[in-house]
Amino acid sequence: MHGVSAIGPDDLLDRPHAKQVAGDHRGGFYRPRPGNHEGGEANGVTLEAYRWNNLPAGNAVRTLSMVILLPFMLINLAIWMRPAGAATDPVIKALCRLLALTLTGMYVLSMVGIALDVIAWRCMSSPDCLAGRSWLSWLGGRPAGLRLAVLALAPAAAISLVWGLSARPALPFDVSGAANQPSPAHRLTAVGRWDNEPLVGRLRSIHVAAAFATLDLSLLGARAAQGLSIGTVALAAGAGLLLITCAVLLCIPPLTAPTEGRLDRLVSVLRTIALGLTVVVWVHVLTSSASWPERNGLPGYNLAVVGLFIGQAVLLAALGAVLFWHRDRQSDVAPSLGFGALAASVAAISLALTFSAELAYRVSDVLNRGAPTAEALITSPPRACIWAILGFSLAVLVTLAVAGVVSLASRPGRIRAAAAIVARDFPDAPADATPRLRQVRRAIARARFTERLVPLAVLYACLAGIGIAAVALGLLPTPPGELVQRYLGLPASFVNFSIGVGSYLIAAIIVGLIVGGIFAYRTPGYRRYVGVLWDLGTFWPRAAHPFAPPCYAERAVPELTCRITHLVDSGNTVVLTGHSHGSVLLAATVLQLPPRVTDRIALLTHGSPLRRLYARLFPAYVSDDVIHEIADRVDWRWVNLWRDTDPIGGRAFPPQRPDETPTAVVHEAPVDRRLRDPSGVIAPAGDIFPPPIKGHTPCESDEAFNEAARELADRLGANDQP
């Protein structure tokens, strides 16, 4: 099992001319072809590899769609990052799903802001904005109702786009019988053991209904500027009732039931009603003949945006209070443990907010190029968007500044720890190896900075949460620059300059994500840096937001379970080896295998983030108990190789103190085995370069890997003897 590196089957097997023996082009099992001079079978050992790197990615279009839906992925990640307390699960799940619903509302309002507010309402009522733009001028001077009705098709198309993307089946085949087995609560075993499509289908119907209801309320808010009528009030009441019903449905326990026919029919009817109501609202706006006041932006839009942000701030505060009250109070637990749900939620909302604000800001900037004077800049985005850009920029800059301070402050301690490791590994290094020893110390010190990233993420979440709440200042008539100058003393020109710089920073981030999404799964070196985060996010099933990218583990884990069971039932013993995220997939698979299979398998992991990342970020699903259960399932036939220079992988178990009772059986070799990296600091005979610093690269080329594999195979063979 490979990790995040996008390699071919030949490279994965380290054999030429591999052939596929099971699976398909997205995820398949490969063996060396018969007759290979290096052999696929030797001494009764068969080499087989599972290539899964196309499951989270695929072609460029699919990858690009994943990047666009990144905020949805983050909010879906939040529901899996909750703490281990079972009593708080229903509340945290409900809050995460309500926050996910607000993201759908934000997505719709961002499209409404561009299509209806900036273009239909502001630009099309300005001759200066329409000058030289034939693609817009054909609607210029038309009644406002007609302009809004035509441009409302853009948000409707945007909703249909994410609806269609989310409707793609996550699994191309029926999950094996493990899907129908009851899965224990708060275990990694949950991944891949249930049919998640009913839940995703209900969430999809609810979010689609809420999205169209949000569009309806935006149109009716503009229509109300003519004066309230019975029809407008009735339609607005119906749309509001739809939104309330969607929110209530997300909080009820039957939402996650495998079979709930009445609920399925209810959400389907709700979605149909929302579609029908949208058609009626569209006709109601289109046929409006009275004159509309066309000033100060789309009526009610700025209030709706600020109200949404205030609602998100309230939900985030409630989520933070619940997490804080039920936090793990053990003294040896990291202070950020259990708060990942809040950090991921804030990151998702902040990212969606800034993307939406930047898009509106850029569209306004393009349309304003034809404006001859400052007074003609009537296509400026809502002030809430400007506050959002300013808040995001400040949160990023402050977090980067604190990260720099933390890096400098922790550097001496990390260097001292690294120096102790280097002195232990290379006690007799010659004097001319000093430069190489310095490089090794720096590599170890950099790898140890990973532990500081989680607290920095929590800091960013707090700052971004304050920025989200500050968006409420968009209701004030005073521009941000003047307001900051009045109360904080900073020049308005400096604030406006900061907003412009922040806008370009956000644009650079968006472009970087798009480019990274296209090339990350095609360039192994680039994927090594960005693929870890993406594979981490798409490992978990969609349980909060239906528009999130599909989960690859929902296919990989049942497929691995089926294949390993087949190999064992065919009379084989199996040594499972996994690198990086591949080791996490194997861990989830081991927890699902029946005892008759686990009695004939062994586990070899290397560069595994199971404890270092997953136990920190997902304490409800990966804990010491779960890791011990994995070892028990394979009767402690498990070896985990790790390096001090690895910034991602690490130990599977915490280092034991001399006064502690060993966690494993006394006569068994320890699970964790540290590899010295590099293997030497001077060039070996016949070479002019010293051995490389391997860090997070796979360990298959290390002799320690081969020794561990042979040892596990021998222990399996000993079990087979009578």
Image (cartoon, grey):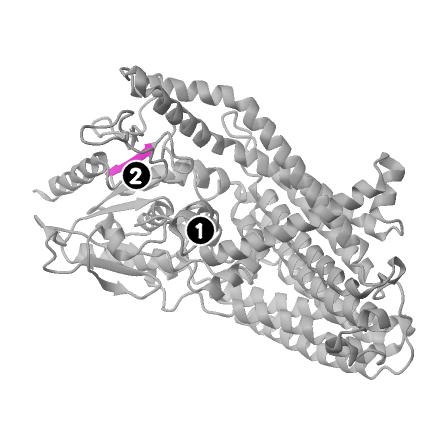
Query: Nearest the camera: 160 or 133?
Result: 133
Q: CA distance from mark 1 to mark 2?
A: 24 Å
Residue 710 x, y percent position in the rendering? 16, 39
Mark 1: few/some/many CA within 10 Å (<14, 14-19, 20+):
many
Q: Position of residue 91 (x, y in %)?
A: 61, 48
Q: Is residue 578 left or right of residue 411?
A: left
Q: Which residue is mark 2?
A: 631
Quadrant of the drawing holding the C terminus = top left
Tag 1 near tag 2, CB within 8 Å = no
Checking the image for residue 218, the label placed there is none
User: Total number of numbered labels?
Assistant: 2
Q: Residues in magenta?
A: 636-642
Going by the image, does 97 lie left or right of 446? right
User: Tag 2 or tag 1, which sits nearer the N-term?
Assistant: 1
Quick check: 516 left or right of 107? left
Residue placed most toward the observer, 205 or 399: 399
Q: Main secondary structure of the magenta part?
A: strand
Secondary structure under the numbered disc 2 in the rendered image: helix
Residue 115: in magenta span: no
| Amino acid type of the residue that numbered disc 2 sits on in the rendered structure | Ala
* Residue at the disc numbered 1: 535
